Image (cartoon, rainbow, N blue to C red):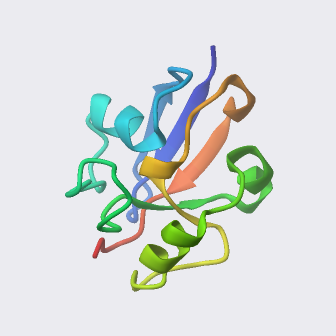
Amino acid sequence: MGIITFVEHDGTEHVVDIEEGKSLMQTAMDNLVPGIDADCGGSCACGTCHVIVDPEWVPAVGNASEEEILMLDMTPEKSASSRLSCQVTTSASMDGMVVRLPEFQM
């Protein structure tokens, strides 16, 4: 179906297969990608699954909800293309997407 590359803060890359319909957070956890804590289990309540989507892929992941933006506002490394990976549903249109993990989660 396709791949997504997670890049740790130190540059280590993890290339994983897309499982359409899963959250980006669950995809990372299923593939043992370090750096996503997911303390709330994916309910948009903690911000510990923060990722930074490469800007060219922002249209593929869509816009953050107001609730997600409030959580992201508390993250120390928020950028214009930040998302909570629990709120991004993977699809075939994300084939080749790169997401970066911040140095610190909340």
80 or 41: nearer the viewer: 41
Is 78 displayed left or right of 46 in the figure? right
Quadrant including the N terminus: top right
Is 23 displayed left or right of 43 in the figure? right
89 or 103: nearer the viewer: 89
Residue 12 x %, y %: 40, 50
75 relative to 31, above or below: below
Residue 60 x %, y %: 75, 44
User: Residue pushed farthest top?
Assistant: 1
Asked which quadrant contains residue 25, the reply is top left
Quadrant including the C terminus: bottom left
Is 16 displayed left or right of 97 in the figure? left
56 relative to 32, above or below: below
What residue do we see at 50% from left, 20% from top?
19
What residue do we see at 42% from left, 49% from top?
86
Residue 91 x %, y %: 64, 28
